[in-house]
Image (tube, helix red, strand yellow):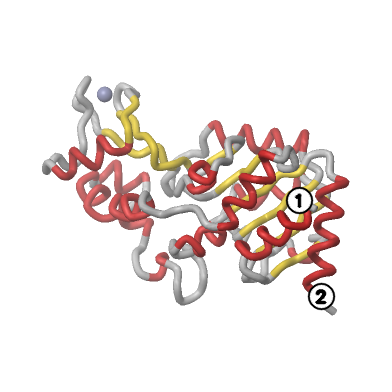
């Protein structure tokens, strides 16, 4: 039988206080309360409306860059306007209190950074910069937006005229340095992982909890790790994270 909410909150706070290495792993669910659609929530996910494989994959960027920037890239532009919610702020505060050691996030929306968190591994990249696929020169994300606004599709490098692409891990791209750093850090330093708003079904990120002895899950839908979690919350993440923060501040 499911324990009462207060009991689960208190149990989680005890686990956090005892932990030597407390980290969080976040997915799209933490950002739905910022008005961003969860890619995989049944009925609401944008996966069901736009096929990202068709418009924002590494394959399309290579074979049809104009389509990539016309369709898939638009999704990234809309994500830029989102603002952090109380869940992001609660995690940022826990880091400032030296309770939370870091956040591994699947999100590219940059909301942890905007909320003030600094120890973040954005394993699927972010929307602050891009780079030339030929010479590697780095550009602000806005550079691509401005180029497109001026009718330059695909955006091109001032140095070598190569295509400038966002620093996001697209479908079909290999995982970047941030993922391997996060994997190593969790394996070596983490004994309590708080999973927030992730269905834990997207690999290789979904493999990360296996390195950790204790996990707590906050997610509206069931995950493959629920059975081995110390505590599971099916409630909204913003409210649970705020309550946990309140208890930790006492
Ligand atoms: Zn270049």
Which residue is at 11% across, 43% downward?
A: 151
Residue 162, placed above or below residue 214: above
Residue 248, placed above or below residue 127: below
Q: Any atom of ligand 1 within 8 Å of the CB at mark 2? A: no
Which residue is at 35% across, 39% downward?
A: 166
Question: In the image, ligand 1 is in what quadrant?
Answer: top left
- Could you tell me residue 57's position as x and y percent? 37, 49
> Few, some or many C-alpha atoms within 10 Å of disc 2 (few <14, some 14-19, many ≥20)?
few
- Residue ranking furthest to the left: 151
Quadrant of res 139: top left
Query: Does 2 sit left or right of 56 as displayed?
Result: right
Which residue is at 81% across, 43% downward?
A: 191
Which residue is at 31% across, 50% downward?
A: 77
The residue closer to the viewer here, 114 or 135, is 114
Could you tell me which secondary element the residue under label 1 belongs to?
Answer: helix
Alpha-carbon span between mark 2 and mark 1: 21 Å
The residue where tag 2 is placed is: 4
- Residue ranking furthest to the bottom: 1
- Could you tell me residue 229's position as x and y percent? 79, 60
Q: Any atom of ligand 1 within 8 Å of the CB at mark 1? A: no
Query: Does 139 sit left or right of 11 as displayed?
Result: left
Query: Does 142 sit left or right of 48 as displayed?
Result: left
Residue 77, placed above or below residue 5: above
Task: Give the mark, 2 or 1, whose residue is nearer the N terminus.
Answer: 2
The residue where tag 1 is placed is: 249
């Amino acid at each position: 039988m499911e324990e009462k909410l207060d009991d689960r909150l208190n149990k989680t706070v005890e686990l956090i206080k005892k932990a030597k290495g407390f980290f969080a792993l976040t997915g799209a669910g933490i950002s739905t309360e910022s008005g961003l659609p969860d890619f995989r929530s049944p009925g609401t996910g944008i996966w069901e409306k736009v096929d990202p494989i068709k418009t924002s994959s590494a394959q399309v960027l290579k074979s049809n860059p104009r389509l990539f920037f016309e369709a898939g890239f638009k999704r990234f532009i809309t994500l830029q306007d989102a603002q952090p919610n109380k869940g992001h702020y609660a995690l940022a505060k826990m880091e400032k209190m030296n309770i939370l050691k870091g956040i591994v996030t699947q999100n590219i929306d940059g909301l942890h950074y905007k909320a003030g968190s600094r120890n973040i591994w954005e394993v699927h990249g972010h929307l602050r910069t891009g780079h030339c696929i030929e010479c590697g020169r780095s550009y602000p994300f806005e550079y691509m937006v401005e180029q497109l606004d001026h009718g330059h599709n695909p955006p091109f490098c001032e140095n070598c005229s190569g295509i400038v692409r966002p620093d996001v891990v697209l479908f079909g791209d290999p995982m970047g340095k941030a993922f391997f750093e996060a994997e190593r850090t969790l394996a070596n330093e983490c004994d309590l992982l708080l999973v927030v708003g992730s269905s834990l079904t997207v690999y290789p990120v979904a493999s990360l909890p296996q390195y950790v002895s204790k996990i707590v899950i906050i997610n509206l839908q069931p995950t493959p790790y629920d059975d081995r979690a110390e505590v599971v919350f099916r409630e909204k993440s913003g409210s649970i994270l705020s309550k946990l923060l309140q208890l930790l501040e006492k």
